[in-house]
Image (cartoon, grey):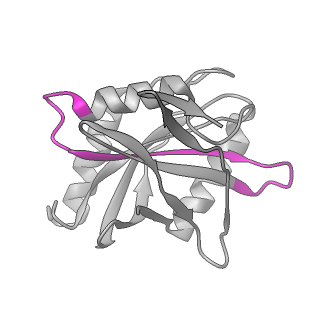
Amino acid sequence: MIDVLLHPRCVRKLKRSLLAAGLNEIGGVLAAEQIGDGRFLVIDLSVQSNGTNSNFERDPTQHREFIRRFHDRVGHKPERYNYLGEWHSHPSYPATPSDADVHQMQQLVEDDEQQSTFLVLMIVKLDSDGELRGSAHGFRRNVAPVRGRLHGSEEEAIHEEWRSMIMILGERTWL
């Protein structure tokens, strides 16, 4: 099981950024501390705000610099603090990965130049009450993606969005 906990500061940053973006998709990368086996505390995240109402494409240069600065701040301890994965928003769609998102993340984790053998994809949106909704999924090389749990804190809750992914005859299907 994968547990992704967002620091309250990250929840507030996401809410501000999502509100400013309106119906346009935005995204970035997740920087986290591993706090247990399969448990991660997202302590910072980058925000790139140049998506459209149906697409977001991450600029690798901007986010590589963000992760470099993150490592500088936490003292270069990659076994504890590291790049966890990607996030983006689906303001007009369910806050779960699309088939294209799943395909892209699987390609990323299986890329020979990718140093991480495990990545998380977090999809978020604001609901009609301005509350954060989202989901987290884990990706490993040569393994089907798994649904994780996404948590906020008591003061900055996150409502999990559910859409189950199952394997049928070797192909991913969303329910």
Q: Quadrant of residue 93?
A: top right
**Residue at 41% over, 63% down:** 1
Q: Nearer the viewer, residue 136 or 68?
A: 136
Q: Position of residue 110 (x, y in %)?
A: 23, 31
The question of residue 123 being in magenta is answered with yes
Q: Mark yes or no: residue 26 visible.
A: yes
Determine whether, in the image, residue 65 is placed left or right of residue 135. left
In the picture as drawn, the residue positioned furthest to the right comes out as 128
101 w.r.t. 19: above or below: above
What residue appears at the point 65 percent right and 44 percent down from the top-left corner? 163
Residue 141: horizontal and vertical position, in percent?
Answer: 24, 38
Left or right: 151, with 155 as reference point: left
Give the residue at the far bottom of this rendering.
154
Q: Quadrant of the C terminus?
A: top right
Based on the displayed image, in which of its 4 quarters is residue 59 positioned?
Answer: top left
Q: Nearer the viewer, residue 155 or 112?
A: 112
Query: Is residue 66 one of those drawn in magenta?
Result: no
Say how many tags the image has. 0
Q: x%, y% of residue 108?
A: 30, 30
Q: Position of residue 150 (x, y in %)?
A: 54, 61
Whether residue 61 is visible here, answered yes or no, is no
Horizontal side of 163 relative to 32 (left or right) equals right
Q: Using the image as rendered, state which of residue 37 and residue 46 is in the foreground.
A: 37
Identify the magenta region: 110-132
Residue drawn at x 15%, y 65% as measured from the top left: 77
- To which quarter of the image does residue 130 belong? bottom right
